[in-house]
Image (cartoon, helix red, strand yellow):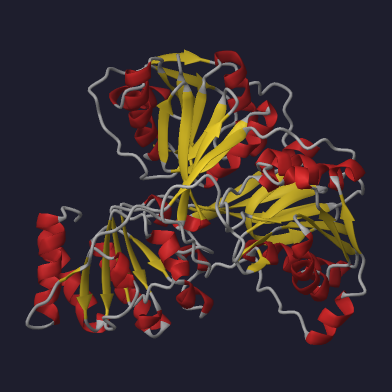
Amino acid sequence: MKIAVCVKQVPDSETRINLAAPAAKLDQAGFTRVLNPYDAFAVEEAVRIKEARGGEITAITVGPETVRETLKKDCLAVGCDKAIIINDPALAGADEAGIADVLCAALKKDSYDLVLFGIKAIDDDSGQVGILVAEKLGLPHVSTITKLDLGEGTLTAHREIEGGKEIVDCPLPAVLTCQKGLNEPRLPSLPNIMKAGMKPMQVVTCADLGVTPPAALVEIRQYSPPPARGTCRLVTGDDAAAAARELARVLNEEAKVI
Amino acid sequence: MPNIAVFIEQRDGAFKKVAWQMISRARQLVDANGGEVWGMLLGGDAAAAATQAGAHGAHKLFTAEGSFTTYDSERYGTAVAAFCRAQKPDLVLVGATSLGRDLGPTAAAKLGCACISDAVGLEFAGGAWDVRRPVFAGKCFVDVVPKTAPAIVAIRPNAFVAQECGGAAAAAAAFDAGQAGLAPKAVVREVVGSAGGRVELTEADIVVSGGRGIKGPENYAMIEELAGALNAAAGASRAVVDAGWVDYSHQVGQTGKTVGPNLYIACGISGAIQHLAGMSSSKCIVAINKDAAAPIFKVADFGIVGDLFEVVPELTKAVRAIRG
């Protein structure tokens, strides 16, 4: 079983965005960067499949040199066998479609039974690249999976939907996007982090992959801070019941939300 | 003449209300800029959709026959792409639901067009669409301009208000959804659970969430009771989900669901930035927490500093008294 896991390094979820006024660019220089939390579910699932059936896992990412540490610690040290970094200055402003094109070029260099993604990256919250890659490669996909069972040349996955799930049958090769609930990602051990330094990590450019960096289909006009919120009005009463009654009245009569 | 097509999502015969919200916003845009609003329906009750779509401002309703009972990315994606090739809308709006988030990029890849996820604002100015969407789960917003026609934009539920404009039923026309010869590989074998009965987090008008302050899984019932009294969805902070007290499908925050209801009631939630990111676009926020210094009060409109074990059951009673 050959598995590719496409991952992204993102600012940690505790990151504060300090943006006082609209700006053409977002200064991300000081952010602490980690593996996208949803990608950790994809990595973990790949490793579990390898442990159960054998195989090889390739982690693939698009990003600058600074992604090395994340790939080593959160991919190679927990069970991925090798990593490919697509690093090309021409990809600096790439949109979802562009990233998908480049990933497709890298995926076509080998032949994978499964291609795993996280459902979305927690920085741009777009959730498109996995699905775009599947379509561009002509592979079936199941998005937002919370359970995976592999058969012989087939898979059955649970896809989260509002208030329930769909149970989907699909042949391999296939593309899956992984949602929280699929598994509990393991943490890397110190000895494994040391050993991960020995695993192959290849850096390639668009030219190496034989792909022209595509023109963006969308243009970013500006970033802006979220609208400011007013101050909090504290509701009080003689006791909890009185305060609760007053809150209900305010929500009903003044805010008109209940 | 920017014609806007709106995908009308239906499941088990029920329409997603985000469709009417999108049609209402689209109608405002075409009234100001010219063009028409077109509903697009796959399967389902065409007559009912035409009535509702027309009432919210759609000029036409395009319908297609086919195997559309359960969602299938190949069938639905092909249908939307076929529709776009034949009718050439400028913009296609889909709801940012579990279906729409899959359908948008699937159809966009087939068309080679732009796709913009999870939008909360849509304007037309200077001959271009301006799509506003939150990034970093709402810690900031970005304005994006699609450079293709059509462009597909997924609109977050509750971002726009559904408004009836008294329009007659939309004139219905059938379109060829390009289904002949399709042999989808990924096939839904079974749908478990249903949208009926339980209010879903991302679409709810009101969300009541519990945090670490509820102290144990047994106390989540208190949150659910208040949610029940308000016909609200029940949410939770990451701490509560990671502790295993409730299922991850309830999690609100940057690694959970992002919600923007009319009313968000946070009970025993301190307001870590991870959580605030997922709910700070709510129209009205209420915090109930015994720690007056909790960051949740910085984003709240109304608050009670008190013990949630005393306040929440009383609030449930008070709500029942009001709602009858």
Rendered-image quadrant of the N terminus of chain B: top left
Judging depth in this view, the residue of A30 and B113 nearest the camera is: A30
Q: Position of residue B225 (x, y in %)?
A: 28, 70
Compare residues B159 and B134 and report the one nearer the observer: B134
Residue A82 on image: x %, y %: 88, 64
Give the residue at x 40% y 80%: B212
Q: Residue at x 60, y 66 (%)?
A: A30
Instruction: Say which residue appears at 48% left-offset and 68% top-offset.
Output: B274
Question: Quick one: which residue is furthest to the left in this view?
Answer: A238
Which corner quadrant holds the C terminus of chain B? bottom left
| A149 lies left or right of B121 | right
Asked if A234 appears above or below B252 in the picture, the reply is: below
Total labels drawn: 0
Could you tell me residue A178's position as x and y percent? 66, 58
Picture residue at 57% right of the left edge, 52% below the top: A124
The answer to whether residue A133 is visible is no
Q: Say which quarter of the image contains residue A38.
A: bottom right
* Residue B140 in view, yes or no: yes
